[in-house]
Image (spheres, rainbow, N blue to C red):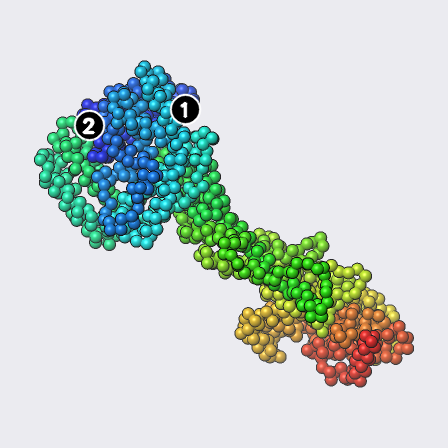
Amino acid sequence: MEFKDHVCELLNTIDVCQVFFDITVNFDLTKNYLDLIITYTTLMILLSRIEERKAIIGLYNYAHEMTHGASDREYPRLGQMIVDYENPLKKMMEEFVPHSKSLSDALISLQMVYPRRNLSADQWRNAQLLSLISAPSTMLNPAQSDTMPCEYLSLDAMEKWIIFGFILCHGILNSDATALNLWKLALQSSSCLALFRDEVFHIHKAAEDLFVNIRGYNKRINDIRECKEAAVSHAGSMHRERRKFLRSALKELATVLSDQPGLLGPKALFVFMALSFARDEIIWLLRHADNMPKKSADDFIDKHIAELIFYMEELRAHVRKYGPVMQRYYVQYLSGFDAVVLNELVQNLSVCPEDESIIMSSFVNTMTSLSVKQVEDGEVFDFRGMRLDWFRLQAYTSVSKASLSLADHRELGKMMNTIIFHTKMVDSLVEMLVETSDLSIFCFYSRAFEKMFQQCLELPSQSRYSIAFPLLCTHFMSCTHELCPEERHHIGDRSLSLCNMFLDEMAKQARNLITDICTEQCTLSDQLLPKHCAKTISQAVNKKSKKQTGKKGEPEREKPGVESMRKNRLVVTNLDKLHTALSELCFSINYVPNMVVWEHTFTPREYLTSHLEIRFTKSIVGMTMYNQATQEIAKPSELLTSVRAYMTVLQSIENYVQIDITRVFNNVLLQQTQHLDSHGEPTITSLYTNWYLETLLRQVSNGHIAYFPAMKAFVNLPTENELTFNAEEYSDISEMRALSELLGPYGMKFLSESLMWHISSQVAELKKLVVENVEVLTQMRTSFDKPDQMAALFKRLSSVDSVLKRMTIIGVILSFRSLAQEALRDVLSYHIPFLVSSIEDFKDHIPRETDMKVAMNVYELSSAAGLPCEIDPALVVALSSQKSENISPEEEYKIACLLMVFVAVSLPTLASNVMSQYSPAIEGHCNNIHCLAKAINQIAAALFTIHKGSIEDRLKEFLALASSSLLKIGQETDKTTTRNRESVYLLLDMIVQESPFLTMDLLESCFPYVLLRNAYHAVYKQSVTSSA
């Protein structure tokens, strides 16, 4: 109500004063006058659209009565206004009859401005609008116009003024051809106008409904219908062509200015014109896309809109970046040219009252006092006072009885308008950017905004401009108003969520492209694997021996690398397309290092980095191709090849985007060396550890696989049920090295710990068996030199086979661990040779008198680097955690000693096993009993380190017992119990060779070497006979 009263009072005052309005002369006064009328009209239309308005004001009055005890005294007037403005435009047409002279004068002054702005793209093109390079000789000349502020005035605002203005003072349409032409031109350009944000006003229908009841307006109604037809059929294509022209014009402008930013000084007007033109076209498209008939939808879908927005953002960035350049230029312009010209104009005025003279002089003095030094010193300029004085001066000099009439001194008005523009270039660049290129309207067209973004990503040629959409989110806060602070949070949250979504989608798209490239590269690298050359070798061999194999006409297999041979550069492969699409999208992601949206900083590159980390993690685990049901898994060497191919592609991303790929590798690959990654998902370390333990080593203990020391690998044995995998292909030197490369020292440590856990469970079972036989073993320990007593005692022992089997399993696990450790040492020696040699030197020079705790720390360091140690620290840790609470340390020590006795006296039973035959070819036994050597040495070293006993003494005792027991089977006559006697004899040699604590001299004192020599001779002779 108060606003309406003030507006009516002001409009009446303007009419009484007979104020002169001309947009080209008193720009600020005319623009604000027209804006006031449009704001008033819009407010009344929006009020009439509130469906429950009568109920709302009724509730307001009731609440007022309850609060204050009486109804609002303005309530009757408010109610009457609501009733009167049921049809707001009809009521306002009556209300504006006395104001029609002033309003029509202001509107008709647009006759020079609006038609010039509302030209077709062809006319713009012919005029080479916005081109800096069309006339190189004038490139450095300042862009000048008599109507500077009108050049970047919003077309959208002018159309509102014309359409609403001539509806309110419709009488002028019948009497003035200029007014009618403006009105028709505006009606042909648009079908709807924005009232407020996404609220629109359908102009043709509303105007026709208003004029249909006015007598003699049939001609106007026909004009409206013709214009509507023209708008529906031609406006879409006209605006489409304009956008097409503006894309190329803004691109040229942005390119030239990025190369020569100094041109921002003289050509600043071009920049703001370009921004304003582009903004108007984008807003027009946004408004009409939702409010046009579907049959003409093609003209309202612009898949290249992102490009136009991008170039707008580029121009805005240039203005912000090179603001000081523009300031320097215009400070000199104001003081060196504008001040002089204005001073001359003031001097030549025939009449100049004192007040006006003072204001004019202050303008001249303000401009004259400017200097470049102020810009260099970073001084903050503020010309708001000067602009306000000019606004007041326009008001003084535009009334009918003013002594200095602006209507008679148009040059003064035009010069001052130019000066005001120049002052804005010094102190209001940010405000100018908001005025000419603010696109915060997208905040209220979320669905259309998201749809445009999706279209942009789907079109490879447009994806490089997709960063324009997150950048637009930085505009949203400019549509908030200080009178409605509660809206800030809602709009701020929307800007954050949209910006986050856009950047996330861009990163996902880039990630998907990178993944596709990686898949292609992995396929190509897979073709180079050794397994694929077998067919080629076979063909070459057959060709040499002239054997005809296979069917005739069988296509020859393409060799790797064929894809790189191009016969025609026009042929584009899938990989080419992927690289092109990726480079386009990465340009966008790399365009800005960061952006600030509602005091939140977004970094586009970080989105890509995080997505690459997640995808790389999933890809590595996926490439293991682990199948829990069938227990299948990729060979480590093949996985390593794929991972390296993947990493090569990821490293190439640094050519497109400034991201730290090394950081991605470190984060992902280090996580893969742990049991679980940061998301709690299994890693390649856990998958391979489980597979080797549960699949490979389990099959070894089942007798399907044997460890071949000569080959340093586990090999499948011929059995009835063939295994689904070839053990050698997973456990030879090259595969173990590949595993070490993938898992790294941390992963290999986890593998070792898992192996040791299995060993400790076997040792726990062995101790139980020792406890069962403790009395017999105690007697045997002291009776090894009494053969008859030993034989009797041995018969009383239970679970002898179980002890040997469990010790063999331990030996197999330790053999596998030694392979893994050796591979790790080889890998680390290649990557960090100096560090490994230092650790090796450190280990080799531990003084004998060193405290065991210190020595174990050194061993732990050595073991982590893959170096073999006398005492295995991982085994010591695993076995020391087994100490029982209810058994004394002395008892534990006794059990450990008796375990060694149990194993020693059980060895002769192996001779009766058919599978215990020694094979010189593999340097071992097919039932893996050669692994007992490693088990006996390492278990003894670990147990007696824990119990602080003498490892050497205990092993001597073991050797005495074992040799005594084995010598007895030499006297046996039963061929079944001694069938592999010589093969078992060799175990003693292996134990001594494996042990850092025993010597051959010691063995010689217990077991004649001649027996060993004969044993070797016998087994080699036997192997030759069997192979023959």
Left or right, 851 with respect to 136, comes to: right
Residue type at numbered disc 1: Ile
Please tell me whether mark 1 or mark 2 is closer to you in this view: 2
Q: Position of residue 475 (x, y in %)?
A: 38, 42
| First-in-chain label (1 vs 2) | 2
State the SS at label 2: loop
Q: Residue furthest top?
A: 215
In this orientation, which residue lies closer to the viewer: 1015 or 466? Answer: 466
Q: Residues within 10 Å of mark 2 (few under 14, many from 20)?
A: many
In this orientation, which residue lies closer to the viewer: 189 or 619? Answer: 189
In this orientation, which residue lies closer to the viewer: 737 or 656? Answer: 656
What numbered label is drawn on residue 19?
Answer: 2
Residue type at numbered disc 2: Val
Q: Position of residue 255 (x, y in %)?
A: 35, 51
In this orientation, which residue lies closer to the viewer: 854 or 304? Answer: 304
Residue 595 vertical position relative to residue 774 in the rendered view, above or below: above
Residue at image x 29%, y 28%? Answer: 182
Residue 489 vertical position relative to residue 41 in the rendered view, above or below: below
Residue at image x 27%, y 52%? Answer: 262
Find residue 276 and report its image quarter: top left
What numbered label is drawn on residue 836?
Answer: none
Residue at image x 15%, y 34%? Answer: 409
Position of the N terminus, as image quadrant, is: top left
- Tell me how far mark 1 sits from mark 2, CA to CA: 35 Å
Q: Residue furthest left?
A: 350
User: Which residue was labeled with disc 1?
Assistant: 50
Residue 441 vertical position relative to residue 887 in the rendered view, above or below: above
Q: Position of residue 653 (x, y in %)?
A: 49, 57
Q: Residues within 10 Å of mark 1 (few under 14, many from 20)?
A: few
